[in-house]
Image (tube, rainbow, N blue to C red):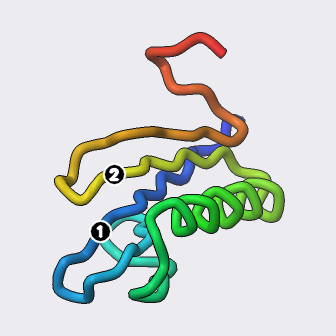
Amino acid sequence: MKKKRLIYELRWVEKGRSWRLYRGRQWAVEYSQRITKRDAERHARKYCHGTFVDEDRPVQLLIKGKDGRIQREASYGCDSKRRKG
């Protein structure tokens, strides 16, 4: 049986002025206000890869900019349908 993938989103939260990693509507990790997007993205990638390894479930990471648009995505254990990989 194929396991359902987990989807995480790295988003900027203006109210807290910080980057947060969300799983669904709940945030999983909040990064320091002083952290740059580049560092937050690096930590989010490590977190998602660790989740893939620990839970043996496919994981997809969506990286959004401050404007809320998807800038990049990464998948661990699954490929998105629109790209061959």
Q: Name the residue under label 1.
A: 12
Q: Out of 75 and 65, give the one closest to the viewer.
A: 65
**Relative to residue 12, is residue 30 drawn left or right?**
right
Residue at (31, 42) in percent of width and height = 70
Q: Which residue is drawn at 21% across and 53% down?
A: 68
Q: Which mark, residue 77?
A: none
Q: Quadrant of residue 27?
A: bottom left
Which image quarter holds the C terminus? Answer: top right
Report if the CB atoms under discs 1 and 2 are less than 8 Å apart.
yes
- For disc 2, the marked residue is 64
Provide residue 76's location: percent of width, then percent of height: 68, 42
Residue drawn at x 34%, y 81% as measured from the top left? 18
Left or right? Give the position of 57 relative to 59. Answer: right
Q: What amino acid type is highlighted by mark number 2?
A: Lys
Marks 1/2: CA distance? 8 Å
Secondary structure state at the residue bearing disc 1: strand
Displayed quadrant of residue 72: top left
Residue 11, above or below 7: below
Q: Which is nearer the N-term, disc 1 or disc 2?
A: 1
Q: What residue type is labelled 1?
A: Trp
Of residues 45 and 52, the one nearer the viewer is 45
Asked if 37 appears above or below 73 in the picture, the reply is: below
* Picture coordinates of residue 12, whole percent (x, y): 29, 68
- Left or right side of 50 for 43: left
